[in-house]
Amino acid sequence: MKNKAEVVIIGGGVNGCSLAYRLAKRGIDVAVIEKNYLSSGATGACGAGIRQQWSTKENAELSIESIKIFEALSKELGEDIGLRQGGYLIAIHDDKEMKQAEKNVDMQRSLGLKVDILKTNQINNIVPILDVKGMKVIGATFCPTDGHANPFKTTFAYANAARRNGAEIYTHTEVIDIKLNSKKISAVVTDKGTIQTNVVVNAAGIDSKKIAEMVKVKLPLTPFRKEIMATERLKPMFEAMVISFRDGIYFSQQEEGQIVGGIPIPEERSGYKTIPTFSFMQHMPRTLTRYAPILKHVNMLRHWTGFYDVTPDSRPILGEVKEVKGFVQCNGFSGHGFMISPMVSKILSEFIVEGEKSDILENLNLDRFKGKQIEKEMSVVG
Amino acid sequence: MKKQSIVCRCEDITEEDVIKAIEEGYTDLEELRKKLRIGMGPCQGRVCIQLVTKILEKKTGRKVSSIPLPTSRPPEIPVSLGTLASDEK
């Protein structure tokens, strides 16, 4: 293991690996520490979706710019990331949701996004297998450039490109301690050795809280176990991701033909439990076959769990904390870390290399939770 | 003949595919799973995982007994969504 690096990134998920790539490409000497294998946390368990339809301006901006990067990413990294843009169809169930949808669409359009409000009779044009009556909807919003990509392929492609640019990636290596020198980062201690550094990026997903505690920084992160399932492969039937904020369900048909989707269980509580539940195995098929009755003939193959690291406003924590110089946060993604990773790594790499600040970094700093009014992201699913 | 040795019947993965991935640096069973989709089909790894573990042992020198198995995921065998959604006991 090397004993010195300009930047040490803790966490080998999509955000850690994409940031490692951006920094290494700029000539920064960077090391990534991953306690398990690459994509072993939330990245590898996620629903793979990429959505631009958000209620807060930062999330919409981050994801709109991220899609542009995703669109060019396979070529840039030299490996296919499995991007498919079939759109996101968001169910609207009542007048209250319609009002929020109209507000969201106005904001999203002001940022240049193409997004429409569909009437019930237009929904089957997008996803023919949906039962509009069973869904109990009065409309939907649809953005055709939303989509999904393969989280494993994306993470591995970033990691390979990072290595080609000189980054060192240590898997199965655990961070034990972070050393400070008069409130500045000075070293990262792992079970395989110590690396001297002045900058640590905390991209450890749900373990970010534990990492921050090593330097006495408190992160308002709550772990939520989320469950997700995959069916057998089917011939292509629809391209859009279907989601409902009220029912909490989301599902799409992936490149290989399997339907992948999730839903929160009614008795969901925060905590670190990873075991899949029977409740999900009943709740998900019930809601899914209500939305698309034809799927009752399809087999579920497996179901698994992953974590959302949820912040009080469901928006990520990004940038350097005021308390410790060189301690940069890249966590709290609250279930949408994969889809905004291209912009997150761009903004953070610009901050680390040039010290460049932006409104987004300012608004998403840990500081925002200190007594100020926070704007909550309303459009969270799963 | 080697090219035709199917290791994962669900996802059509050959011995050669597995060896190539290991040589590219995917030396963890979970990473191989995610790279090649082995164990993600209807058999959920019953057929392929033992074979892939053997290949890993041959290529990396790590003993089979020291290679952790991937997490097993319910419902273990394919079950229709209609059956799972049903109220009948």
Image: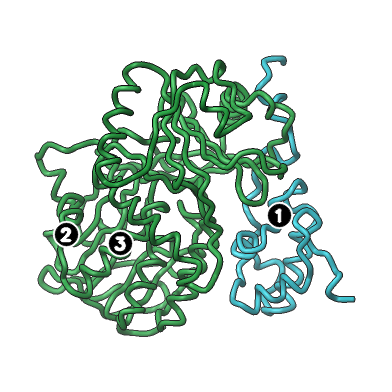
Q: Is residue A291 above or below residue A133?
A: below
- Please tell me how crowded label 3 is: few (under 14), some (14-19), or many (20+) other residues with Cα within 10 Å: many
Output the letter for the chain in green.
A
Give the labeled residue for mark 2. Answer: A358
Question: Pointer 3 indicates a residue of which chain?
Answer: A
Q: Secondary structure at mark 3?
A: strand
Q: Is residue B76 shown left or right of residue A153?
A: right
Amino acid type at mark 2: Ser
The CA span between labels 3 and 2 is 19 Å
Closer to the N terminus: mark 3 or mark 2?
A: 3
Amino acid type at mark 3: Asn
- Please tell me how crowded label 2 is: few (under 14), some (14-19), or many (20+) other residues with Cα within 10 Å: few
The CA span between labels 1 and 2 is 44 Å
Q: Nearer the viewer, residue B72 or A309?
A: A309
Contact (Cβ within 8 Å) of mark 1 with mark 3: no
Q: Disc number at residue B39? A: 1
Q: Is residue A360 above or below residue A378?
A: below
Q: Residue at x 12, y 59 (%)?
A: A322
Q: Residue at x 19, y 37 (%)?
A: A375
Q: Residue at x 16, y 68 (%)?
A: A356
Q: Is residue B58 above or below residue A235?
A: below
The CA span between labels 1 and 3 is 32 Å
Q: Quadrant of the C terminus of chain A?
A: top left
State the hue of chain B: cyan
